[in-house]
Amino acid sequence: MANKESGYRIKRGGFHIHKKNWLLLLLGAAGVCILALIIAWALQNQQEAARSVETLGASLTAGASGKAASSQSSSGEPSTASSSSAPASSAPIVVSASKGGAQSGQESASSSSEESAGAIVVPAGGEVGKPSSSGAPDERPDFSLPYQVAASEAVDDSYFDDAMFVGDSITSGISLYSVMSGATVVASTGINPTTILTKPAIRDKEGELHTILETMSAYSPAKIYIMLGANGVGWLSQEQFLSYYGGFVDAVAAQHPKAQIFIQSILPVTMEKSLSENGIYANGKIDRYNRALMEYCKKKGLPFVNVAEALKGADGALPADASSDGMHFGPSYYEKWFDYLRSHTLKGEKEGERKK
Amino acid sequence: MTLKRFGALLLASALSVTILAGCGEKGGESAIDADATAQSVMEKGGYTEELVKQEDSVIGASYPLLDLTQVESYAVYVSGSGATPEEVAIVTAKSDSDVESVRAAIDRRVDDLKFNFQDYHPEEMPKIESAVIVQKGRTVMLAICPGSDAVRELLEKL
């Protein structure tokens, strides 16, 4: 008795598979094996991703003050200086928008330091800092950090009319996308902490190139928002990074003694970018550098604005659909950034308290 | 009655002069539509990212030497991310005497991009090295993109 459709032949002693179907059976078996391998691989990746998220959750946002310091060693960083990836540069760029005009009565950087130390801090959106399931409670962000600018009542755009934004290509986007037309933007694509003081990067209308600091001298902003590091975190050690960054901040404070300087966190990259290039731009590393920046702000008495938390997805990374190169993003994410800035200011009740 | 006829005649004459003047402008130098040309370039150039149009308030950031008082019309699109040097600029000078400074502003922009990207993203340098600059009458056109050959062909046919 034969059943051609089902492909096997039943004889008295049992059933035998038709020769023609051996091949199909073998292929089927191979398919099952491949499927099993794919599932195993996916499960492994999922576990790794979960570990990565846990690490990010434990390391970022508002690093714990004293505890953070002990975990800030740059040892274990995935390589440093790769000349090919070392951005430097400078050149064209962004000065824009305008305004400025120093306001009398602005707090100086030094005076604000003492005052900000007493601020009550309640960072917005703290999901990144949730404790990980794997423990590591010691690394949990401490939301009582006094130098991180707290959530506050949202201000309108006129608040930024006397503000200047300083930085690299990410900051240039504020101007290019006309995100905050009243603010002044002094930024240069490719600038990094090592070049910002020395590289002629801004061309004036006469065609002459000037450094960022030289260009800043033409304005008198009441608030200066600095964002640096996206181009340096990949190849500068944490110590070098802070040293160069601090040198620039000191120069800005000396040049604009009446302006309130804000330090903004380095922004996250996409998960793909984070995992690429041996992790030199890993979000975990960016988080560590941000924590070091916060410690620096604490010492210097400067307000730290943790805008990174506004751009992070649930996995602690910049969402993949936000960026084509893993680092830069479009107007909708600039809006998230500025929504955060509008709702994290020193204006209002807390400012009043500081002045008492 | 005579006055009405005279008025009508005057009006008709004025209209005729206006229409003829308009025809004269069109018939003289074929005007290049900056926006339409920029769009065509972006379609042909194989651009890898969406560019951002630069308006009067921000154009100085990218083109500090471009004096808008010397410009009749322009369409400039730059990389919003800053991660690439991809760009389109179609600029028509107001007069023949303004063309040289418009051209200088565009040449300087290319120099700046070279200076900017040689260390930052050296892998993007070939796009700048093969920048297309075509001048047609009072219009100077710049395209920096992966498909420079196709764009050059497009612009030279205008």
Image (spheres, coloured by chain):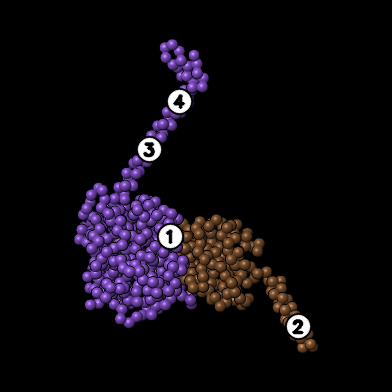
Chain colours: A purple, B brown
Residue A299 locus on image (x, y percent)? 23, 68
Residue linked to disc 4? A25
Alpha carbon separation for disc pair 4 and 1: 50 Å
Q: Residue at x 39, y 71 (%)?
A: A156
Residue B8: image tag: 2
Which quadrant of the structure image shows residue A243?
bottom left
State left or right for residue B110 relative to residue A31.
right
Q: Horizontal and vertical percent for residue A159?
A: 37, 74
Asked if residue A251 shows in the view, the reply is no
Task: Return the mark for residue A329.
Answer: 1
Is residue A278 among the parts visible in the rendering? yes
Count of numbered marks? 4
Q: Amino acid at mark 2?
A: Ala
Up-down: is A103 above or below B84? below
Asked if both marks, 4 and 3, belong to the same chain, the answer given is: yes
The secondary element bearing badge 1 is classed as loop
Residues under labels 2 and 3: Cα distance? 87 Å
